[in-house]
Amino acid sequence: MEKDTQIYTSSVFLMGLGECGGNLVGEYINKEKEEGGLERVTGYLILNTNRYDLVKVREKYKVPPENILMFGDTPMGVGGRFMEAYNLVEVWWDAIAEQIRNLGGDAASTFIILTSTGGGTGCGATPALIRKIRETFGSSGRVYVYVLGVLPFEDQTSEALNTIWLLHRLLQEPEKGESADLAILLSNRTMLRRRLQYERTMVMDILSSRLGIDITDVNQLSTLVTASELPFSSKVLEQTFVDIVNPLIVQTLIKLLQLSTFTPGKNIFPVTDMADIANKLDTISIPAIFTEIPYQAVVDEQGKIDMDGLAMFLQEVVNVAIKYYSLVDIQEDPKASSVLYLLSGPKGIVDVHLDRPIKEALNNYIAEGAAVTPTFIQYDSWEVPMDLLILLGLPKLQEIRDLVDEAEKLIKLHSGSKIKERWFLKSKGVSKEVLVEALNEIKDLFDIGGNSSE
């Protein structure tokens, strides 16, 4: 479709928070510019408490200065002390809000915050931003706030504890104003494993080139991560891994934003906008994505599509997407409480007749009584690919159990005396009791046995 035929109707504003969120928004913006423009969003802003990280993002992605804002008085950021970032949002909100208005955000009905869940800036500032966005820009109508949160790598106990606090905040009662309308979680560890398993050659080339070493076997990575002496810093290693997985997150965001822009030759039904996604799903959701479904495999010699064959084929696509392409490890029996899927492609094949086979395949992954909401995005052109994005609401996740276990161990380590427990206020900015409450409520939500009193 030619650019001059686009109808600009998007009302989504992106906010990249912290180092992770800034990189993700930078990648998304560059990807969209490569394809001709930014029709899917009204604007974007990258925020951080660390000046050096903002400089890196600006240089790497050629971000204009008006789309970047540092808040806080300490150039090196807040570290892992997330409550400092939380409080800084209140202090700096007037400047942040003015920048959002200047970039067109006051016209947005949906804000999407991209961030890591374990970093100090992203963890602390996210709930505060949600509250201030609603107070400032929601006076004339409902404003939806989504969070795309990236879970930390394993064995980062401090980040695990930050993650538990943030998830708890995002799930608070709406009256408190800090809960997300939808929090889509993505996992660094799972996305890296996915790419290593299914795109190994490409990933090995990136690792070898970036780190300056020869990696010929995926099994060498475990040795690489745990080695005491490396020819590069652990930060360089982690950033290399992040650069490998970020395209998966950007791909998910692009598919999600298909609902934000209407163009000639495009039809969406029955879910018609971004707000409907939040209304149909549990607050915590996990994406699974399968792009460029090879539906041509069921086209006969006369060019006609075998619809029965396509239905069976799509059932296997659902299984592969959830088992192998989910962006947090779903495992065998997630028992999701709700599901929304977006099937997009040429209107000659993408239609309601495909709902039944997809739902039959999804039955293997949902709890009894869970609602499944279909969304079909049809294009007049036969040149567009056929893609499937599945959002599973509140599945039972081993990775959440792992994060709970790591956080619980850290709490226990700093418990036992008043002197030891000062660590919580010093390092996080909240009391031990606040973190124990968050931990116990997350355990209840995900059916993880035993409350913690440490």
Image: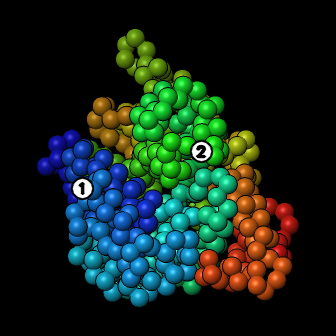
Q: Is residue 234 above or below residue 108?
A: above
Q: Is residue 194 above or below residue 40?
A: above
Q: Horizontal placement of 102 versus 319: left or right?
A: left
Mark 2 Cα-neighbour bin, 10 Å: few <14, some 14–19, many ≥20: few
Quadrant containing the C terminus in the rendered view: bottom right
Say the numbered circle drawn on residue 113.
none
Q: Which residue is mark 1?
A: 62
Residue at image position (78%, 70%) is 413
Coloration mode:
rainbow
Q: Horizontal placement of 409 versus 112: left or right?
A: right
Residue 223 lies, in percent from the top left, at 64, 37
Residue 121 lies, in percent from the top left, at 48, 71
Measured in 3D between alpha carbons, the distance from the residue under mark 1 to the one under mark 2, in whole angstroms, is 34 Å
Q: Secondary structure at mark 1?
A: loop
Residue at image position (37%, 17%) is 303
Closer to the chain start, of discs 1 and 2, is 1
Q: Amino acid at mark 1?
A: Lys
